[in-house]
Every structure is written in structure tokens, then in C-alpha cells.
Image (tube, rainbow, N blue to C red):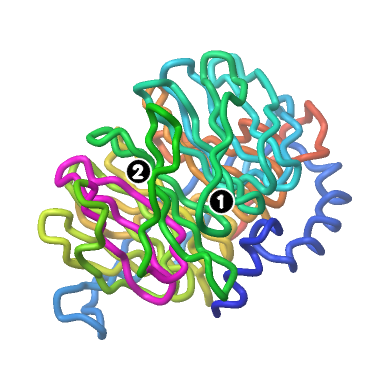
Amino acid sequence: MIGARLKRRTGLSRSATLAVVVIVLVVVVAGVFAVALSGSKSSTTSTKSSTSTASTTTTPSSTSVTTTTTTVPVGFGLSHPLGMTYDAANGDLYVTNNFTNTVSAINVASAALIKTIPVGLAPAQVALDPVNGYLYVTNNDSDTVSVIDGASNSVISTISLGGIHPDGIAFDPANNCLYVAEHGNGVGGNTISVINATSNIHLREINAIFQPTGVAYDSLNGDVYVTSGGSSVMVVDPATNVITQQISVGIVPEGIAFDAANGDLYVVNYDDGTVSVIAGSSNTAIATINVSTSVRSVPFLVAVDSANGDVMVTNDYTSGVNVINATSNKLISTVSTGAKSAPAGLAFDPANGNMYVAGEVTGAIIAISPTLVATYFAPPSGSISSATSTTSTFSP
């Protein structure tokens, strides 16, 4: 389990086995046009979790997804896009290209590639500091963080870290610091780096954590949450930069996101196909949501749609996005992102209400509307720029 996790985190993007899929898809996708997919809402059944008396497990019913092919927009030359964030100040999406060591700045309104920015090796995740307008990119194979000025879309600094293989990153505006999860190499280098966002200086390391990957900041209680290899989430007090608590979740937690509307954190458990819900008010796990829509589920990253009150989780096995209602904590829909797309990072645009999803293997960006209709914002790598409309229906 640990070996597989590290294997897809050392500059090989998700896993070495995806390389075979890429070769096949380059041939297939060259003739693929655009896809618009409408996710249909499905009812769910709530059952008690067998592992916790305080948790409930929600099991979805089977769903059907409609696929509609329409005109394909212009591509942006993405290469295994992995992490993504949206900058409301300039209206740009920032997407890490894991295979070409670059970040693409894409303007949402004009659907135009603004700039391709060279960074470190195997860029993974990206976080925005809206105070200074800088983007911080974790470079998985350089053990550094690249600092991009959103005004000029250029790298202004490169910060060396104390650990190995930086991954998830989050900004804490209360102390003006960034927290970087470094999952190590299986032997060592497991730590959390703290960076001052004013000086762009690496301040310190927080140790006593095993293979951290995801990071989230809770703006209501001021804590930082870090997913830890195994089955736990560590709570960090930013005032002291000390781990104050360990919360049990599912197996191999990866992505984590905070929902300011309800004060809950959503933790994606990669190895057991579930999402754990943590109440920030009590720092306890209050629910477990089953996001399996087939025999198997491999959820990866998560983001919150603050306009609709939905939580969206990218899922490898279904090549889709699981949609969770944050009020009921139930799976309400699965929106397809295209066959074997390996959806990864997500970014929400509050201006148009769209959630943008990176298709890591296909090199596409999918826009999911507030009504859960999916269209290509950027087509798969190698596809053409226009096509005749056709329609097909399939189950993910």
C-alpha cells in the first residue's frame, strides 16, 4: 500500500502504470472530439459505519451518466495536469504540468492560455496567497517551492525545503504562513514545512508525522489539518506549530478541504473508497461517506463548491467526480470526466459557479457547471479544435 502510494508521487505523477494508458490514449484521443457530460442525481442509503459509533456511512445507488459531444475548444498543451487553483484577482486558473515541469496560467473568461511558466521538477500542488497575489507551487522532485507573482506570471523565488517530495500546500492568512506536506521517500524526509509568505523564507519543520500529503486551513478555528499516511489526520496549532491532535479517518487519506459554510473538513481516503467528515468545532470524525459507484473506488483530491454547498471528489476508478451534498453528507451524483481521464486537481470559480477538474492522463480540463453538466474547457491533449455534435450514453 505504501509502496504504491510513493511510486505515484515521485515525478511519475499518479503511477507508473499510467504510462501504458498514456501511449494508448495519444492514439485514441487524437480522433476524440469534445464531451459534455451531465451527471444525474441519485438517491443514497445511509447505514451505520462498522468502525465508529459516531460515524454514519452513506452508500450510493447506481447511476447513469449521459455523454454529449460538442464543439471542442482550443487546447492548452497540458502535460499530466495535477494540481490547480483559481486566482479571483486576475481570473486565471493555474495548473501544474507534472511531466513538463511547468505551470499553465489560463484565463477563464477568454479561455486563453496566458503563459506557460517553468518551475521545478514534477510540480504537484499549488496554493494562492490572496494577500500578496503570489502562487506557491510544490515541486515534488526538486524538494522546493516555486513562488509565482500572479501580476507578471513569473517565478520570483524558489524556496528550498527540509523534507523530501513536497506535495499538498495551504495558506494560513492569520499568521501569514504556508504549510507544505512532504511525504518523504519511504525511509525519511517526512515532515511539514512552514514558510513565511512575506519574506518567502522557510521557517521550520514540524516532525513526528508519517508521510503527510494533503493540507487544509480551517478559517473558523484557526487550525491546520494534514493527512497522514495510514489512517489519520494531524491537527497543527499555527500559534505554536505543534501537532496537538490526531484524528482517525479512513485508509491512506490523501486530499483534504475545508467547508467554511458548515465548519467541516472533508478527507479523501484513497485506499478504502470513502470520504471522512471531520467537525472542526470538535475535531472529531462525524461521518464516513462511501463514494464507490462500481466494484471499486479510488478517490484522490477534493474541493468545495461554496455556491451550491457541494463537495466534489475526483475519482480514478470511475474517471469522474463524486458530488457530495455538504448538508446531508450524502453522495448525490457522479459526473464523468471522460474515459480513463484520471481526474486529479480541482478549482472552484465563484464568478461563474464552475468547478474545473484536471484530467491527468488525457491532459484535459473539464468544467462542471452548477447544474452538474460537464464540458471540456480544454480538450484532451492531441485532439482537434472542432467537431460535429454526436450523443452517446454510458454508465461509468
Which range of residues does the magenta coloring cover? 209-238
Identify the disc placed on residue 304.
2
Relative side of 324 to 280, left or right: right
Q: What residue is rendered at 44% in x and 46% in y?
A: 169
Residue contact between numbered discs 1 and 2, judged by CB atoms under 8 Å: no
Asked whether residue 256 is in view, the answer is yes
Instruction: Indicate the position of residue 253 as horizontal and vertical percent values.
Output: 41, 67
Query: Which quadrant holds residue 13?
Result: bottom right
Relative side of 42 to 360, left or right: left
Dot 2 falls on a residue whose secondary structure is strand
Dot 1 falls on a residue whose secondary structure is strand
Q: What residue is rendered at 36% in x and 58% in y?
A: 206
Asked whether residue 61 is in view, the answer is no
Q: What residue is rendered at 37% in x and 54% in y?
A: 256
Relative side of 343 to 252, left or right: right
Q: What residue is rendered at 85% in x and 58% in y?
A: 24
Residue occupying the far right of the picture = 27
Residue sitting nearer the eye, 226 or 281 = 226
Residue sitting nearer the eye, 42 or 207 = 207
Instruction: Indicate the position of residue 335 as horizontal and vertical percent values.
Output: 50, 50
| Quadrant where the N terminus is found in the figure | bottom right
Residue occupying the far bottom of the picture = 50
Mark 1 / mark 2, whichever is N-terminal: 2
Whether the magenta-drawn stretch holds residue 329 is answered as no
Residue type marked 1: Ala
Tell me the CA gap for discs 1 and 2. Answer: 14 Å
Image height of 292 relative to 255, above or below: below
Disc 2 crowd rating (10 Å Cα; few below 14, some 14-19, many 20+) is many
Image height of 36 relative to 281, above or below: above
Give the residue at mark 1.
344
Whether the magenta-drawn stretch holds residue 237 is answered as yes
Query: Which quadrant holds residue 248?
Result: bottom left
